Image: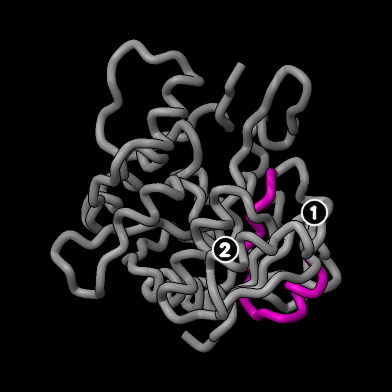
Amino acid sequence: MTTTTLGIIGTGMVGAGVARRAVDAGLNVVLSNSRGPGTLDELVARLGHRARAATPAETARAAEVVLAAVPLKARDRLPGEDLVGRIVIDPMNYAPSAAWSLPELDSGALTSSELVQRDLPGARVVKALHNIGPGQLLDLFRPAGSPDRTALPLSGDDAGAKKETAALLDALGFDTVDLGPLAESWRSEPNSPLYAFPYVGPPPAGLAVAELVAWVQQAPGTPAPKARVEELAAAAVRGPAGFRMD
């Protein structure tokens, strides 16, 4: 891995969880959100001296690799000009509702990561860290070579960006499985066999959607080795895009 600093735009559960793993792995992190650096004082204090807060544009300029941990419908707030040439890790998932949807995703014309790449034409987008919950991310990291090391999928159109992202995930404690270009990232999106459940095991029967989401967020991690992730990716069949809560 050539980068020593990870930029994180968006400090919800995903952004904060990745920041924790990055700092513990010896990386510096620059954090930002839509509310301003001053709102991140508590998180920065918890993370320690390797973390600092900035604006989204400053975060993009400070790091060669940036995690864009924002809702998909907020992607237009990303500092596109400052992300030109950067590796942008896309953990965003499509969650359509009665009030909001995207026809190009509903029709299957694009995957959500292809949409992000279209909207950030100068960036090098890699789909990753989207199919595992932050709780499991903090449970399942292991040193390289561990027999119970978990693998995470990634997709991208830029081979160099995928190599750097795989090196980052290795530093965070995970193996990787390359699913190919962004057009194939549906294999690990919501409604695919690779989304969430390989890392938590079977859920209790009879849960409503909101209860299921809450269960996944709290469930202890279940290791998913590389061979299992490869098997699930190969068996995936493309279905309707997105995860609906309503």
Residue 124 visible from this viewpoint: no
* Label 2: which secondary element: strand
* Label 1: which secondary element: loop
Q: CA distance from mark 2 to mark 1?
A: 22 Å
* Rendered position, 57 above or below 133: below
Q: Which residue is mark 1?
A: 34
* Rendered position, 107 above or below 57: above
Say the numbered circle drawn on residue 21. none
Q: Nearer the viewer, residue 61 or 187?
A: 61
Residue 95 image position (x, y, % from top left): 63, 32
Residue 134 image position (x, y, % from top left): 45, 50
Q: Residue at x 42, y 73 (%)?
A: 24
From the viewer's perspective, tell me whether residue 220 is left or right of residue 179.
left
Q: Is residue 86 magenta?
A: no
Which of the two discs, 2 and 1, sits closer to the camera? Answer: 1
From the viewer's perspective, tell me whether residue 202 is left or right of residue 154.
left
In this view, the residue farthest toward the bottom is 2
Residue kind at label 1, given as amino acid type: Ser
Residue 131 image position (x, y, % from top left): 45, 46
Residue 69 visible from this viewpoint: yes
> Which span of residues is magenta-colored?
56-71
How busy is the neighbourhood of tag 2: few (under 14 within 10 Å), some, or many (20 plus)?
A: many
Say the numbered circle drawn on residue 126. 2
**Label pair 2/1, CB-CB below 8 angstroms:** no
In this view, the residue farthest toward the top is 206
